[in-house]
Image (spheres, rainbow, N blue to C red):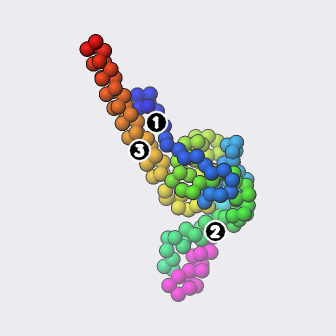
Amino acid sequence: MLDAGTIDLDVADPIEGASGKFVLPFDDSGELTAWAEKSLTAKAGAEVGEKAAAMLAAKVPFGGFMSGAEKSKAKELGAVTAIGGWDFIKENSTQFFNKLYDYSVYLHSQFHGLPGYENALAASMAIYPQLEKSHRSSVDRAYKDASKKARKLAKEQRKLEKKLAKEKKNK
């Protein structure tokens, strides 16, 4: 794999149906879902949610000390509301994941570089703010693991070739 200049990522398959925790912004045919197409609205909604949370925090004693998780939740709520709510998102989704790591690696490996990928990723980050923090490291880790696996396989292949060459020479 390394000699050919390619690395194959270990990619989990999505869960079909509405049973996973994280919804993909692409449908089974690779088209953007209806909720992903509203990514600009989602971004605006996230900003509204963030501002509303800041205003609420200003009115509550010690509210200015909201945790990052609370701010993230407010941002998520604003984006989800702007899109049409979780029911709309799930009704317009066909593929799901239970782990955000698997979600990131699949999204990157299947759609990176295709039209709509950046909008889809932005829409996903709007409804899953933690994805913004973890996406790059998840993809980097997947490549690192795949590279390590490829080097190991190449080393085993060289050992086997040496062994076969030695056996052939001794005959």
Mark 2 → mark 3, Cα distance in angstroms = 34 Å
Quadrant location of the N terminus in the rendered image? top left
| Residue 89 belongs to the span the image colors magenta | no
The reply to whether the C-beta atoms of the residues labelled 2 and 3 are less than 8 Å apart is no
Q: Which residue is mark 2?
A: 77
Give the mark nearest the N terminus, 2 or 3. Answer: 2
Query: Which label lies toward us, 2 or 3?
Result: 3
Q: Which residue is mark 3?
A: 144
Front-most of residues 134 and 39 = 134
Magenta stretch?
47-63
Along the line of sight, the residue nearer the viewer: 32 or 2: 2
Q: Secondary structure at mark 2?
A: helix
- For this orientation, the residue located farthest to the top is 171
Q: CA distance from mark 2 to mark 1?
A: 38 Å
**Residue at the image position 65 percent from the left and 64 percent from the top:** 79
Rendering coords of residue 156 (x, y %): 35, 31
Q: Position of residue 150 (x, y in %)?
A: 40, 36
Q: Residue at x 65, y 58 (%)?
A: 19
Crowding around mark 3 (Cα neighbors within 10 Å: few <14, some 14 to 19, many 20+) is: some
Question: In what quadrant of the picture does the C terminus appear?
Answer: top left
Examine the rendering and report whether any part of residue 126 can be seen.
Answer: no
Give percent across and percent down for residue 60. 56, 85
Residue type highlighted by circle 2: Leu
Q: CA distance from mark 1 to mark 3?
A: 10 Å
Residue at image coords 41%, 44%: 144
Provide the major secondary structure of the magenta segment. Answer: helix
Precedes in sequence: disc 2 or disc 1 = 1
- Which residue bears the numbered disc 1? 7
